[in-house]
Image (cartoon, rainbow, N blue to C red):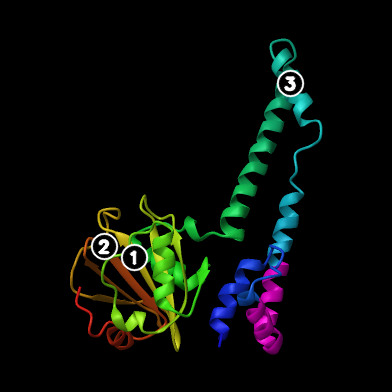
Amino acid sequence: MMDKVEAKLILANYTLDIPPTDDPRFDEALALAKRDPELMAWWTQAKEDDSTIQGRLQEFAPPPDLRPALEASMENVSRWRSRRRVLVRYLALAATVVLMVNVYFTFIVDRSDAYAGPLAERAFNYSFDGPRLKYFNKDTTKITDWLESQNFELPGQLPPKFLAQEGIGCRPLNWSDSKVAIICVDAEVVYHLFVAKEGEFENFDLSEEFEYEPQKAGWTVSKWESQGHLFVLTAKASQERLESMLAGYTP
């Protein structure tokens, strides 16, 4: 049965898009939201916020005479200085519109690929903000199969206790040339496992031993290297709980 965490991850993908009519996972998430006033209030507010930002950006549409002004200015720039000033003004406006639209689609619709910095820091920030997943399934075997079907090369061994949990979903992230995979499972809290190819993050301190670092709001990050891959595990949980999740797994 779908829980609130999984429902929120699914609903987050439809704050602007038209909800699907033939997606049983969305239908289940929506049904849960209708039974949970707090979840429905969050989704309603998220839709209103994104719609407001979208509307404000649309107010920056270029003026209808932009193209004629550009053409006239280019043809007569040597003769008419005033038209050159118009050209500069319109070009600045057009650049502003392009920039704002780019920011909107990158950071509002889906900003997953915009995170930067060292891999462990990037993974924590993305986990803390709330990931947007592409594929959902409670079976972790199907999750890993789906990632491989997307041409993502997973290592031969992943933490078995992590894989034994109830799956939520996954997605590839464009954080490197070979991409980075995120896999989420539910074990009272959501655990996020990030997998990347070794050598694509130079500032990753390689170690085959688990390293743990506490983060804000009760979160913990663990990282290690194994089988030519880099791993980062994040969760709003203590170090002891992350150690328990990795028990029985040898990098």
Q: Tag 3 or tag 2, which sits nearer the N-term?
A: 3
In the displayed structure, does residue 171 sit left or right of residue 162?
A: right
Q: Secondary structure at mark 2?
A: strand
Question: Nearer the observer, disc 2 or disc 3?
Answer: 2
* Rendered residue at 27%/84% (across/down): 243
| Amino acid type shown at disc 3 | Glu
Q: Which mark is residue 229?
A: 2
Up-down: is 89 above or below 5?
Answer: above
Residues in magenta? Answer: 27-48
The answer to whether residue 133 of the structure is visible from this angle is no
Check residue 71 in the rendering and tell me which mark sits there, or answer none: 3
Give the numbered dot on residue 195: 1
Placement of 198 over or under 102, stated as above or below: below
Q: Secondary structure at mark 1?
A: strand
Instruction: Give the crowd class for mark 2: few <14, some 14-19, many >=20 residues within 10 Å.
Output: some
The reply to whether the magenta stretch includes residue 31 is: yes
x then y, percent, for residue 251: 20, 73
Quarter of the figure with residue 199: bottom left
For the residues marked 2 and 1, what is the alpha-carbon distance in whole angstroms? 7 Å
Q: Residue 59, how many percent across, how many down?
A: 77, 49
Which residue ends up furthest to the right in the rendered image? 64
Q: Which of the 4 image quarters holds residue 13?
A: bottom right
In the image, 89 versus 49, the foreground residue is 49
The amino acid type of the residue labelled 1 equals Val
* First-in-chain label (3 vs 1): 3
Point 42% across, 82% down: residue: 236
* Secondary structure beneath label 3: helix
> Are the two marked residues, 3 and 1, in contact with CB atoms closer than 8 angstroms?
no
Mark with earlier residue (2, 1): 1
Across and down, in percent, residue 219 comes to 40, 80
